[in-house]
Amino acid sequence: MAFSTLDTIVAIATPHGRGGIGVVRVAGPDAVSIILATTGLHALEPRHATFARLVSPDDLGVVDQVVVTWFQAPHSYTGDDVVEVSGHGSPWVLQRIVDLACGQGARLAEPGEFTFRAYLNGRIDLVQAEAVADLINAVTPLQARVAMDQLEGTLTRRIAAIDAAVFDVVAKLEASLDFPDEGFHFISRAEARAGLAAACADIGRLIADGRRGRLVREGRLVVIAGRPNVGKSSLFNALVGAGRAIVTPLAGTTRDVLTEVVDINGVPITLVDTAGVREALDEIEAEGVRRAHDAVQIAALTLVVLDGSTPLTEDDEKLLAAITSPSILVVNKSDQPRVWSRVQGPGSRVLEVSAKTGAGLEPLREAIVHSLAGVEEWRDTPAVSNQRHLQCAEVAHAAVERAMAAAEAGATEEIVLAELTDAREALETLTGRRTPDDVLAHIFSHFCIGK
Ligand SMILES: Nc1nc2c(ncn2[C@@H]2O[C@H](COP(=O)(O)OP(=O)(O)OP(=O)(O)O)[C@@H](O)[C@H]2O)c(=O)[nH]1
Ligand SMILES: [Mg+2]
């Protein structure tokens, strides 16, 4: 990475805009001297909040009254000297504080550079650094919990335990190499296989979890489709929890696609309401129907809404026949007598709801999440939530499986060891112990400045 860790860096750490307070963070070897120079203080005491006035060197005017706190290396977020300056939350004042620090030799921090230093200084591993970004970006409580678990080191510890189990076998195999004639001297094939089988199963559990985890972290697009008047917009509003879409008894009310992000059982779902699909009456409606089709094409899941209180129509049948992506058939208006009973749909689940009364919405929420996660059970917080982690875990899993097969087939220790080295490399890439620079650059570039 291009970042130098010898520089002292500065950035506004609080969001853009006005606030009660705003925080400027300075980190690096000159952090304290820079703050002393800009405040006229003689010394800072570690972990003590000190009141100060920041003075402009140009006109000697007071820029702001601030509170400065020194987190002395290595007991700081980044691991080097960090001084946090809490000023009044004015964008102008905060920018002036940054300028003053730069005038004393600091440079502007790159996005994620504070966290990158924490990683380089061994304060956190890569999983935890990524969790920091996830926590900041979390919009549902479950997302925040998954990120917090990772920040607390839950995943790191699980990976470490798996690596230790693999290493145990590696060490014994390597010792055996010193006695080439006897082969698997320090460990029998059966023992090696048993040790690896446990590690393999652990990685397998992480991977199985990863699908749910990614769902929680990334969210999904769910599209509501159906012929006009079945209650798509009513269902949309009920799931959003607000009267977002126009609802009328007239067929063809919705002409455009409407989008809202909704927390559905912890998963951030981008929910899309669409125009009712039928032979359009005018050009506007025709465009709406086209957009509805496009939305269904890119949806992770389609809620095909049918009206249980009126007979199925040709439009319903056409739509049902056309749906190829994963879908749930939602039979709406369950508060009215049901006039048809056919339940069909290849592999689709059928649920009765009433967008009007709210009946059946909770089972529908569950079905949405289950269908997207591909699992029925939605237990504890998933440990793996990130595609990169999942890929590393898959590489490690495959390598351990190959090692087991090799040991079973009577291969030499060298061959088994080579596979296990691959497995450990993948685990180390996951935690960041040997992650290529371009991957690091990619990860940290997605942070906000000041973090
Ligand atoms: N009884 C009853 N009426 C409902 C229910 N859901 C929707 N409606 C009524 O059905 C009519 C159509 O509702 P909308 O939500 O606008 O239907 P839509 O599918 O979005 O229609 P278009 O936008 O025209 O495609 C309205 O009069 C709603 O009040 C329900 O669960 N029960
Ligand atoms: Mg509508």
Image: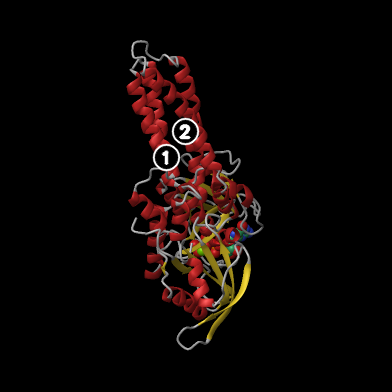
Mark 1: secondary structure: helix
What's the amino acid at mark 1? Glu
Label placed on residue 428: 1
Label placed on residue 216: none
* Residue 1 falls in image quadrant: bottom left
Labels 2 and 1 touching (C-beta < 8 A): yes
Q: Is residue 319 above or below residue 448?
A: above
Residue 156 screen position, x and y as percent: 51, 42
Q: Is residue 348 visible?
A: no
- Image colouring: secondary structure
Nearer-the-camera pick, 263 or 245: 263
Q: Is the residue at mark 1 in contact range of ligand 2, meaning its CB lies under 8 Å from it?
A: no
Q: Estimate how packed mark 2 is, as few (under 14), some (14 to 19) or many (20 or more) residues with alpha carbons within 10 Å.
A: many
Residue placed at 52% from the left, 47% from the top?
329
Number of numbered discs: 2
Give the labeled residue for mark 2.
163
Nearer-the-camera pick, 256 or 271: 271
Residue 154 screen position, x and y as percent: 56, 42
Q: Estimate how packed mark 1 is, as few (under 14), some (14 to 19) or many (20 or more) residues with alpha carbons within 10 Å.
A: some
Disc 2/disc 1 C-alpha distance (Å): 9 Å
Nearer-the-camera pick, 85 or 22: 85
Residue placed at 40% from the left, 15% from the top?
184
Mark 2: secondary structure: helix
Q: Earlier in the sequence, mark 2 or mark 1?
A: 2
Q: Which residue in the rendered view is the most extreme toward the bottom? A: 59
Residue 386 screen position, x and y as percent: 46, 47
What's the amino acid at mark 2? Asp
